[in-house]
Every structure is written in C-alpha cells, then in structure tokens.
Amino acid sequence: MIPGKRKAIIDDGMNPELIKGAELDGILQIPKIKAPDYIFIPDRLIPYTKLSKDKIYRNTAVVFYEKDTNFSEILINPDAALKSLAPINAFITPDPSLYRNAPLPVQITNVYRNRAIGFYAQVHGFYVIPNIRWGTEETYTTKVLPEKIAFLGVPKHSIVAIGSYGCIQTKNDKYHFKAGLEEMLVELEPKDVLVYGAMPSNVFSDYERDTNFHHYDDWLSCIKKGDNYGKR
C-alpha cells in the first residue's frame, strides 16, 4: 500500500453471500426462488412494521408494502430481521420501490434485492411467496432487454403476491399497473395471486378467468373498519 494512502472499505449493500447456492435466472443472473411444495393462502397480510412481539400469528403472511425506509433492516441485516419473523407462517418478499422515474439499473437492482432476500428466507425455512413489482415498461416487456426483468427468478404455475396500494391513483398509474399485470399472468401463469390493496374492476376484471385472485385490504383500510387483521 502506498504510504499515506488509506485503504478504501466499500460496502455496496448487495450482500452477495445471501445467494450462495442459488440458481440464477437469465442474462442478469437474478437469484431464483423455488416453487413451494404446496399452495398456502394466508388469512391475513400484515405489514412488517405492524407486527407485535406480544401476539401469536396464525395463517399470516408478512408483507413489505411500506416506505422502503420502514423495512431497511431486512435489506441491511436480514439475519436479525428474519429471527424476528419466526412466528409468521409465510414471508412475502420485500418490495423495494421500482419508481418509473428511476433509472433502469436502479429498478433492476431492486428486483435483485427482492429475490435475494426471498431466496435467503427460503434457505432459512420460511414459506416464501414472491412479491412481483414492475416499474417502467422496460421491466415488464422486452422492448429494451431480451428478458422481462420483473418476472425473473420466479417459478411459474405457483403463487405470487402483488401490491396495488398507492399504485393505481392516476390514469397513467392504472395503465402501467394493468399492462404489467397482464404480462405477469402471461409470463408466470400463476395459480394464485394475492392482492394487497384495492382491486378495481376496470383493472382486474379482464383477468379473473386467468388465475385465482385473493384480495386483502390494506392496513389503513382495516384499521378504519376496526379490523386489525381483516381480509375481505
């Protein structure tokens, strides 16, 4: 080392050790989440920050449809976060934001984080349900890259989860959400889709014959109805 120079210590935050032993999907090498041996449909979806250490949860899945900062712990220190989730029946993979105004490499990175944490949770014995999130059409079509990035690393003919909460507020939002939903159903052909948030007919009705949708109210709606764990 040159005298007077400091050694650079850089943590890129990607935690490559999380995907040790993973099978990688596509040219982008997104880690694969394995299909579960059976389909589990939870009674409740509870946001990560709303879990209580004092409660016993049954037939419950944890979700991460919150601000990214609210679940940063599981991205930074997944071992500690997963220990706190031991009583949960199912783990829906984290939902790092795929904002449409974000550069494509950022969107790809957050797809990778989603799958990497999901694979790691699966290795540690969790029943893992892949959360599918898409951003710009570059993520759910092959207009730019030869693969549909948003669906890499996810088993076909299985179970997935999606979040509509906060994602279908404008006409443009609805267009991209519906277009991505259609591409997902074609690409993955899921048997069951868990939907966290609203399910307006002008977005979902065209696809009700393609899969089994299971609707869950978002947390705030449940609170307003006086049901902390409700499923509609």
Image: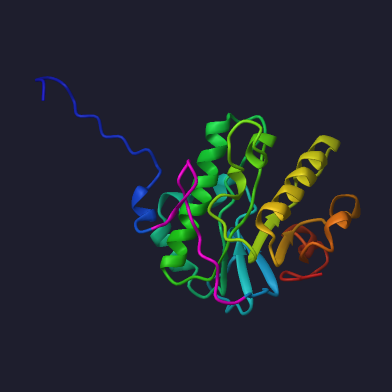
Residue drawn at (90%, 50%) of the image: 202
Residue 214 showing in the rendered view: no
Q: Is residue 167 left or right of residue 204?
A: left
Q: Is residue 30 magenta?
A: yes
- Location of residue 15 with respect to 212 vertically, above or below: above
Specify the quadrant that holds the C terminus. Answer: bottom right
Q: Quadrant of residue 160?
A: bottom right
Q: Quadrant of residue 190?
A: bottom right
Looking at the rendering, the stretch of residues picked out in magenta corresponds to 22-38
Q: Residue 34 placed where, x, y %?
A: 51, 64
Residue drawn at (72%, 69%) of the image: 228
Q: Is residue 102 left or right of residue 213?
A: left
Q: Residue 110 placed where, x, y %?
A: 53, 43
Work out whether residue 20 or residue 145 is closer to the camera in this orientation and state it. Answer: 145
Q: Is residue 220 magenta?
A: no
Q: Is residue 229 left or right of residue 14?
A: right
Q: Residue 147 placed where, x, y %?
A: 58, 41
Work out whether residue 64 or residue 179 is closer to the camera in this orientation and state it. Answer: 179
Q: How is the protein colored in the picture?
A: rainbow
Work out whether residue 221 or residue 128 is closer to the camera in this orientation and state it. Answer: 128
Q: Number of labelled discs?
A: 0
- Location of residue 158 with respect to 30 vertically, above or below: below
Residue 150 showing in the rendered view: yes
Q: Residue 130 placed where, x, y %?
A: 59, 59
Specify the principal SS of the magenta part. loop
Residue drawn at (64%, 53%) of the image: 132
- Location of residue 62 with respect to 89 vertically, above or below: above
